[in-house]
Amino acid sequence: MICRPFFGDQRMTGRMVEEVWRIGLLAEGGILNKNGLLNSLELILEHERGEEMRKKAHELKDLVHNAAGPNGSATRDLRDLVDLISTS
């Protein structure tokens, strides 16, 4: 994932993608030009760091899939919230 923040909290989200979740990059200097795009794509597709990003993205995908499943934590928490609101 190559992040190019425009406004609001997108810069923070881009930093989360790059530094915390490690599944992508922020555009160099916040500007996505031809050279920046080519450098980012090369890093993601050809280097070890890109391989680590893809592996981490697959791990996060599995976590989200499990959480959103019928017995997952997100489903359970939403059900609990609906029950709480319905009984109030």
Image: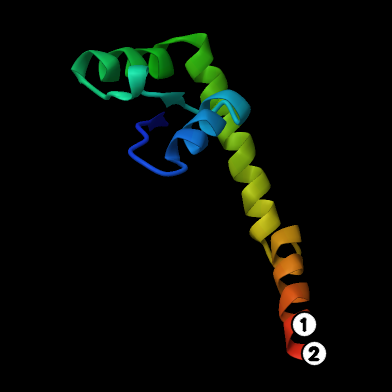
Label 1 belongs to which residue?
83
Q: Position of residue 50 (x, y in %)?
A: 48, 18
Residue shown at 43% from the left, 40% from the top: 10
Foreground of the two, 51 or 14: 14
Q: Give the quadrant of residue 72.
A: bottom right
Q: Looking at the picture, which amino acid does disc 2 mark?
A: Thr
Question: Is 11 left, or right, of 32 in this rendering?
Answer: right
Residue shown at 52% from the left, 14% from the top: 49
Residue 74's place in the image compared with 80, above or below, is above
Q: Position of residue 14 (x, y in %)?
A: 47, 33
The answer for how far apart the CA atoms under marks 1 and 2 are is 6 Å
Foreground of the two, 31 or 64: 31
Residue 42: assigned label: none
Residue 87: assigned label: 2
**Quick one: quadrant of the C terminus?**
bottom right
Q: Are marks 1 and 2 in contact (CB under 8 Å)?
A: yes
Identity of the residue furthest to the bottom in this view:
87
Q: Position of residue 13 (x, y in %)?
A: 50, 38
